[in-house]
Amino acid sequence: MSHPEVGQRLASIKHVILVLSGKGGVGKSSCTVQLALSLASQGRKVGVLDIDLCGPSIPRMLGLEGRQIHQATAGWVPVFADSDKQLACMSIGFLLPNKNTSVVWRGPKKNAMIKQFLADVYWGDLDYLLIDTPPGTSDEHLAAVEYLQEWNPDGAVIITTPQAVALADVKKEINFCTKVGLPLLGLIENMSGFVCPHCAECTNLFSTGGGEGLAKHMDIPFLGRAPIDPNLVMLLEQEDKTVVPNVNDPDAEKIVTGSIVETYQHCELSKIFATITAKLEAGLEATKS
Amino acid sequence: MSTNSLGNDVPADANEHCPGPQSAGAGKAAGCAGCPNQEICSTQAQGPDPELSLVTERLQDIQHKILILSGKGGVGKSTFTAQLAFALASSDTDCDVGVVDIDICGPSVPLIMGCAGEQVHRSAAGWSPVYVQDNLAVMSIGFMLPNNNDGGDDESAAVIWRGPKKSGMIKQFLKDVDWPALDFLLFDTPPGTSDEHLAVVSLLKESGITGALIVTTPQEVALQDVRKEIDFCRKARVPILGVIENMAGFVCPSCHGHSQIFMPTTGGAQALCDDLGIPLLGSIPLDPRIGRACDFGSSFLDTCADSPAAQAYLAIIARIRQIVKQT
């Protein structure tokens, strides 16, 4: 089946990347947000589409809770996370009456919503559209791939945590990508160790190295390893995204920035994600030529 | 986006006065004229699922059926389910426990309970579950994935199924598995509020659900998904036994300094419970040994009985026993 309305929207978008993981809670949304912030800080125009319909986390993480979608003649106008309009976002979270409302939907209804997100959102010109997904290999994933396939999405970035229990689910997701013909752009090992703020000793809460081993084993580019950083957790949690979080010294003088894109540059993890996005962009460049 | 009742989805392209695809008038009501779904609705079987009574019959000797839920993924649903099952089964050899893993796309229970690679056997009585101990039976799709004999790992086989097929599998887990008489049957669920959850709730409608245990982590990003799950339980009339806060704080093994990894910026599970009037059963700190015990499929409560996390687990399990006894 052809979906020309999706193709029309994607015509003004250079790269479409899905962020996937078989496992829940490994940091798909937080990595999506960090990839987006990292790309936006380098001057790229980025869109984030949240297709986790039962548990949308992106609005809170980008500080956009309670914002509304506007309907224009060109389509749904996404919500912008910064005043420069570098970073646009669309999520079902913007369509719910209040934050406690559950979205109890079966597959067909979810598919219809995803199609609408892909066909009706007026993104404008974008360098990147990052699609954040729910865990698993089911309706949402099949729907996204089905609607995107004929327009050749660039591929998928896989997120995992290092422990064996997560790797088992992630292998299934990689298998899914191979089955549906989605190129694997790379793998990020998230939550790899936690540095104790008291003694700087690194504890591997969920073991370490598992992601890198898996990437090697499955022959996927390994993009990098990101430790748990309480300041990042705080940044994604707090409502005011312009204040640079400092959990180790809450009494220190507050640094205030212009937007979440700038605030993120003050986080330690932004350096790691700068190398991750550089690797990702280099890989995309290589496949193009 | 209207759902006229739980799980009674009106298709996106339905007519405005759609009576609901599961209603008696589906496909025949005045509002159905000209609807693209009219034919499907009018030919579909109406009324309750005729196989529901088979499920009820299978489960009649099971005393307590408990769902382990969370809107959020990776908060420790499977870990908690496994440790609860181990603890219940080891406390008393007369206490029979079963675990059903209804996370079809990401079954973790076999690995966490140390029975990965086992096979389900078929007999005239039905599928026999995998026994981890004499009094601890487990059923998961992980046991049924095709075996790969050429040296590759069979665990990487993806289950790429849409909703109806997942619901069908869950029905089989309840209808076709030769469950013995059990004191507890624990349901480990995937994150979200979708097909799997609707399936299990509707299949257990006649046999009754003792209640749901909700697992969360302290940060708001997780709590907002958990609120949705609680809303789901209320809509589906599943009683909530209580909330378990997992990954609450971390004690450094080298300097014993305490730190928060997932900050309770909005008051954590305690505030959520106060707000919604649900009991908080306890908070479990992060301990790297829990993750390791899961990777090796051993009982964390046996291997690290002295750790503060194990103490927290035991206190919560004691409370669950007490609550269940009262119901």
Image: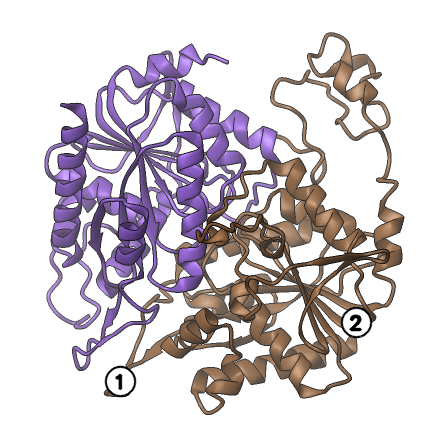
Chain colours: A purple, B brown
For the point 37% across and 64% down, the residue is A163
> Residue at image x 73%, y 19%?
B17
> Which residue is label 1 attached to?
B257
Q: Nearer the viewer, residue B211 or A150?
A: A150
- The image's mark for residue B182 is 2
Q: Is residue B181 above or below residue B157?
A: below
Badge 1 marks a residue whose secondary structure is: loop
Q: Chain of mark 2?
A: B
Please indicate, yes or no, whether residue B286 appears anywhere in the rendered image: yes
Label 2 sits on what residue type? Answer: Leu
Residue with the most extreme top position = B34
Whether discs 2 and 1 lie on one chain: the answer is: yes
The mark that comes first in sequence, 2 or 1, is: 2
Circle 2: element type: strand
Q: Judge left or right: residue B127 versus residue B142.
A: right
Q: Crowdedness of circle 1 by 10 Å Cα count: few (<14), some, many (20+)? A: few
Indicate the amino acid at tag 1.
Gly
Determine the image quadrant of residue B222: bottom left
Q: CA distance from mark 2 to mark 1?
A: 43 Å
Q: How many marks?
A: 2
Where is the C terminus of chain A found, in terms of image quarters? Answer: top left
Query: Looking at the image, which residue is at 71% across and 61% down?
Result: B239
Q: Residue at x 38, y 67 (%)?
A: B264
In the picture as drawn, the residue positioned furthest to the front comes out as B150
- Where residue A74 sits in the image (x, y, percent)? 35, 13
Q: In this rendering, is residue B258 above or below A244?
A: below
Q: Nearer the viewer, residue A220 or B162?
A: A220
Across and down, in percent, residue A95 comes to 47, 34
